[in-house]
């Protein structure tokens, strides 16, 4: 029987507590500090070498560059100290949007991250609602993507006169899945992003949203540009209320204020990145996946 330890970084300890409590495992919070030159330091407060397996949990946003280095240091230390099975939980997976070479000369950053984790001993990477699950095909380590869509559906409940909307073709599968739980109608917009400036534009489209409430569902709200552009179109088509639901809310440059100004009535996010809008708790979904791995 493999003896597992749950270790989390301080800002992720609620996830660690939930996993450890439900599965009856020991939970330790890693010590962290930053050296004066900016380098990262991590330390297990208990003897990790007495465990065969480790569940390592890191909310890797904000400060993703530092937090990813912390995970790498902790993973490699555990491996070096003899831990054989290391499952890394990154509820939000930074660098996952750069999952292909959009312009010549670019890295496939997701591949870089996954290769690094694999090379230092990670047995698996577990995340929630990765930007494109099919991008995990390139991974040489086990990658598990948790879909939170049933939670979104339960939150929405059965409502009349509602349309679910994907702000682009890439997220249409998410909206379709939520709609399968609810039986609500759904549609999508066509989005274009300037790969150099990041600016978002959308093609106007006839949608049957007049007099209806619309729920825009996406994986990430970063600058808010996507939701704002979609909201402009929906308002011009007569939608009465527009809500935004996203798994990961980075909310850069006061994206939430700008979204409300544009006419968004509510923002709902999960707790992969804690914000004031994190009303959907995905911890139990993570616990269930870990339970499956420990069998
Ligand atoms: C991109 O395809 C993603 O699914 C999101 O739509 C995007 O990351 C949102 O970014 P922003 O809020 O900056 O428009």
Image (cartoon, helix red, strand yellow):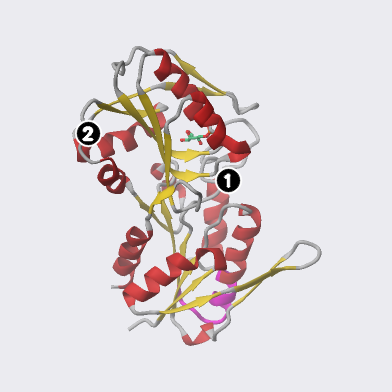
Local secondary structure at mark 2:
loop
Residue beneath label 1, please? 109
**Residue with the mark numbered 2:** 159
Q: Residue at x 21, y 41 (%)?
A: 181
How many numbered marks are there?
A: 2
Which residue is at 29% across, 66% downward?
292
Query: Could you say where residue 154 lies in the image, as x and y percent from the top left?
Result: 25, 46
- Residue 114 is a magenta residue: no
- The part of the image, by quadrant, that contains residue 46 is bottom right
Instruction: Answer yes or no: disc 1 within 8 Å of ligand 1.
Output: no
Magenta span contains residue 76: yes
Residue 102 in percent (x, y) is at 56, 32
Compared with 55, 241 (above or below) is above
Residue range in magenta is 75-85
Crowding at dot 2, Cα within 10 Å, few <14 / some 14-19 / many 20+, comes out as few
Q: Nearer the viewer, residue 11 or 51?
A: 11
Percent position of residue 100, x then y = 52, 38
Would you say 4 lies left or right of 79 here? left
Q: Residue at x 54, y 86 (%)?
A: 47
Q: Is residue 276 above or below residue 257?
A: below
Front residue of 285/261: it is: 261
Can residue 87 be seen in this snapshot? no
């Amino acid at each position: 029987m493999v003896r597992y330890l749950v270790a989390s970084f301080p800002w992720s300890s609620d996830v660690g507590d939930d996993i450890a409590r439900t599965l009856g495992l020991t939970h330790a919070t890693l010590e962290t500090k930053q050296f004066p030159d900016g380098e990262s330091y991590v330390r297990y407060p208990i003897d990790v070498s007495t465990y065969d397996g480790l569940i390592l949990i890191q909310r890797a946003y904000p400060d993703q560059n530092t937090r990813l280095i912390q995970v790498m240091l902790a993973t490699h230390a555990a491996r070096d100290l003899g831990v054989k099975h290391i499952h890394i939980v990154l509820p939000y997976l930074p660098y996952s949007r750069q999952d292909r070479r959009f312009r010549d000369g670019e890295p496939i950053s997701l591949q870089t991250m996954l290769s690094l984790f694999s090379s230092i001993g990670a047995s698996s990477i577990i995340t929630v609602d990765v930007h494109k699950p099919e991008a995990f095909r390139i991974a040489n380590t086990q990658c598990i993507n948790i879909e939170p869509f049933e939670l979104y559906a339960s939150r929405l409940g059965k409502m009349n006169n509602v349309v679910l909307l994907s702000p682009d073709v890439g997220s249409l599968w998410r909206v379709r899945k939520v709609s399968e739980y609810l039986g609500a109608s759904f549609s999508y917009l066509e989005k274009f992003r300037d790969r150099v400036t990041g600016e978002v534009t959308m093609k106007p489209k006839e949608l049957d949203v007049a007099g209806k409430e619309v729920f825009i569902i996406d994986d990430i709200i970063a600058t808010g540009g996507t939701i704002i552009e979609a909201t402009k179109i929906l308002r011009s088509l007569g939608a009465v209320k527009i809500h935004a639901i996203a798994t990961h809310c980075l909310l850069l440059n006061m994206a939430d204020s700008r979204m409300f100004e544009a006419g968004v009535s509510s923002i709902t996010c999960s707790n992969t990145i804690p914000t004031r809008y994190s009303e959907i708790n995905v911890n139990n979904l993570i616990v269930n996946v870990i339970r499956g791995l420990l069998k």
